[in-house]
Image (tube, rainbow, N blue to C red):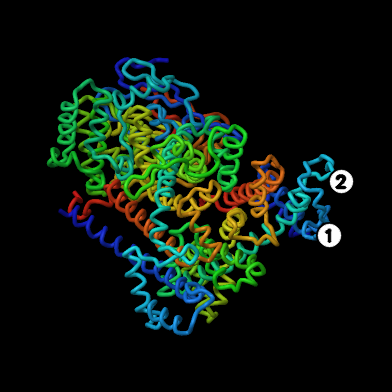
Amino acid sequence: MSALILAWHSDVAWSFRRSPVAVVSLMVVLILVLAAVFAPLIAPYNPFDPASLNLMNGFSKPMEPNAFTGDTFWLGTDDQGRDVFSTILYGMRISLFVGFTAVLFALVLGVTLGLVAGYVGGWTETIIMRIADVQLTFPAILVAMLIFGIAKGVTPVEHRDEVAIWVLIIAIGLSDWVQFARVVRGATLVERNKEYVMAAKLIGRKPGAIMLRHILPNVLSPVLVIATISLALAIIAEATLSFLGVGAPPTQPSLGTLIRIGQGFLFSGEWWIILFPAVTLLVLALSVNLLGDWLRDALNPKLR
Amino acid sequence: MNRNSEATLSVRDLIVDIPTRHSVLRPVDRVSFDIAPGEILGVVGESGAGKSMTGNAVIGLLTRPAHIASGEIWLNGDRIDHLQGEPMRRLRGKQIGMVFQDPLTSLNPLLTIGDQLRETILEHLDVSKDEAHQRAIDGLKEVGIPAAEERIDAYPHQFSGGMRQRVVIALALCAEPSFIIADEPTTALDVSVQAQIIALLRRLCRERQTAVMLITHDMGVIAEATDRVAVMYAGRLAELGPTKDVLTDPKHPYSIGLMGSTPLASAGKERLTQIEGAMPRLDSLPDGCAFHPRCEHARERCRQNPEPRLEAYQNRAACWFVEDLYL
Amino acid sequence: MAQANAMLAFTIQRVFQSIVVLLVVGLVAFSMFRFVGDPIDNMLGQERTDADIERLRGELGLDQPFVIQYAKFLGKAVQGDFGVSYRQGRPVSSILKERAPATLELAAVSGFLAIFFGVVLGVFTAIRRDGVAANIVLATSLIGVSLPTFLIGILLIYLFAVELGWLPSFGRGDTVKIGGWTTGFLTWSGLQALILPSITLGLYQMTLIMRLVRSEMLEVLRADYIRFARARGLKEKTVNFRHALKNTLVPVITVTGLQLGAIIAFAIITETVFQWPGVGLLFINAIQFVDIPVMAAYLMLISVMFVGINLIVDILYFNIDPRLRVDRSSAEG
């Protein structure tokens, strides 16, 4: 409890309370994350349970009783009578799961390689950072597409849908580790020559222990900032890939997949099928971005 | 206000304020002085004493939120403290020149020195491009740049620090201003070229009868170049008088301390002395005389009442007990 | 003399680095080709004999050592031979040749829009940093960064094609063939068709360039030489544009170059939204159908472009900043 009180009075918390944008963004992100986690409890229908679907309910407008069945859906239904509100909740689950896991993967990979590169130096460092440089030349989304394409080629056709989500996570994660590695390597280079690390070396600690105990805590705040910004990018990347049809499989539609499906109905006037998933995605990405922006200013004014 | 009509520059009771969230800081507090044509006034003081702020106020380059709160600035008989925007811009370069501290950063790295000279000349003087070019070359020759005809097309990074400061001086003088502000013009230079730059500045201003405000914290430069000297402390003038007198016979306790801590000014004395403590920050100025916490002669009056203000040319030191101290 | 030498040494060094990058990318492309899926499977149908397999194996050189195969692959790639598309059964090079003009025209227009408006708005928001209009532009740009490209495209289609009916929602319109190049610039419908896709593609890059120009310019405006330029009484216009902008553009050029490369990659998304018949749409279809030769060729092609753009940017940089250009020791006075 006292730790909580202490945290509340810290500089970061102070700047948080003074920034309405940060407070609102954090609340929106929390609400969306909770809604996604508890989707099975909140959603009025399970859109993937064929038993609950009634094709007669197809193309119901939002807040209007269906002409055939008289059922009313908040945000309307799609062509197969699926409740749009429920599909959004389940779709957000996939989007957030992919986003969080991909960033976690990129973080672990990038921080590890950055620490190793910065601490070990020499050839190891040269190779790691050269790969980072070459990869950075190409936009992350292109790298992710390529990895997705290769993985699809390697996987037997009958298993493609099952592994698609994990392939997506790895593709986005692999396309995003470079930022982490660069910052951590930079910070490690600075910390490595400080006296306390020298002292740890002198008393015979192993390199791994030194990195974990002494260097890692010092690079946490920039890593946190990059992770937040990366989360927004990963959510957008996932949506983009799924929209392009090279992401989440039709059996597990994410927000991007929903928008891809909805695009077809835009011309025929069923605007709600695309509008609500699109707005959800935008609000999610924007609030994570704003949160990241604020975090960057609050934790490390020098990191631009 | 007894303005001196002979002077090129007259500053009267100048106050510069910086409003902050909590209070109003006053980096320049009721400062008055004159500079005559061809005269070099040295302004000394520690960093933060208000020297540069005074210079920036005169040339109209205070950065917001700093601004002139009150007082008067007269240049060649015209009042300029209230000028804004376009009229002030026309004055800069044409009537007031300025030399900055660091010649490495005060020239635009992407333009040749000729570009920068010509644009300044064309901005202020009604001459053709060819004339401007010729004037630029003459200006470079005057400040002692060898092979000026060729070097005029060189970029700033192709010059050494001392040469660059000569270029900066040529730039400050190229539109023939009647007054220039030199803000620590030698601080960033090698000791070996400092004297050259000071001598150059002195010679050019004598020849052209240009008035100079020479801001520095280097007593050597003061002794070398200036006719009169103003000592600033915490935004206020502590002492103002002929250089020779102030150096050899300082009146204000702060000046006395300053001279005592300078090898040059205290030549012949047994040992260097130092002033206890540090100059107060602007947000925590003491009541009474700003110097009293560090003054060994401070009395009740100094703690209660702000020090007396210097009227230009009347008193020399802003201290209640100037006479007493020497009795 | 010294100048020309420095330039030459610099260029050679950069060209060498570029070649190394291309060799690495070539290795990735070749590995895809060689190890992802079985090329024999893909090229021969269901009815095949062992003799067929052996023959094809020999023809493709799959029985040779890896390095030799790689060298041959590179040799062919340099000549523009990327093999035959699994899906279309035609040489990849001729498919690419057909598709490239559409993407390049779209990228060129978007790039121009992004740079022009990015720089103009960046300078505007920096000079008027406290102005209301500048702050509105800035706030909007943050939404722009969070808005995925495909949503911008859909939004534009909905507004201008579906609701207002002013502009076409997909395709390139009528094109004119000049030599081997099909252009949409010369027909009215071609130009109309370009508007929405090029805005969609350019908007995100424009936002990035704008924000970068703004922050660099604010930094430059604090520099001593800007204060000195003001102290010399130069006009505000001269200070902002002749002195500040030029210095701002030096770092901006690097990033902008990379952004232009990114435009070609992001064209994949825009081309999908607008069914624009370029190489990006080709690539997405190739991924969906695991058409490895097309994927490999696209990767190689886009790398050459990226590396080329990087090289040009580096050399441009070298020419703009005199500090990099001249041999310092000879000039030190």
Residue B125: x %, y % from top left: 24, 22
Q: Residues within 10 Å of mark 1 (few under 14, many from 20)?
A: few
User: In which image quadrant can residue C8 be found?
Assistant: bottom left
Mark on residue A51? Answer: 1
**Pointer 1 indicates a residue of which chain?**
A
Most extreme residue toward the right is A70
- Is A164 on the left or on the right of B199, as rendered? right
Q: Position of residue B145 (x, y in %)?
A: 16, 40
Labelled disc at residue A69: 2
Please tell me whether mark 1 sits on a helix, a strand or a loop.
helix
> In the displayed structure, does residue C155 sit left or right of residue B140?
right
Residue at image position (69%, 58%) is A253
The amino acid pointed to by label 2 is Thr
> Which percent across, then down, holds residue C43?
47, 72
Residue B296 in view: no
**Which is more toward the observer, A170 or A249?**
A249
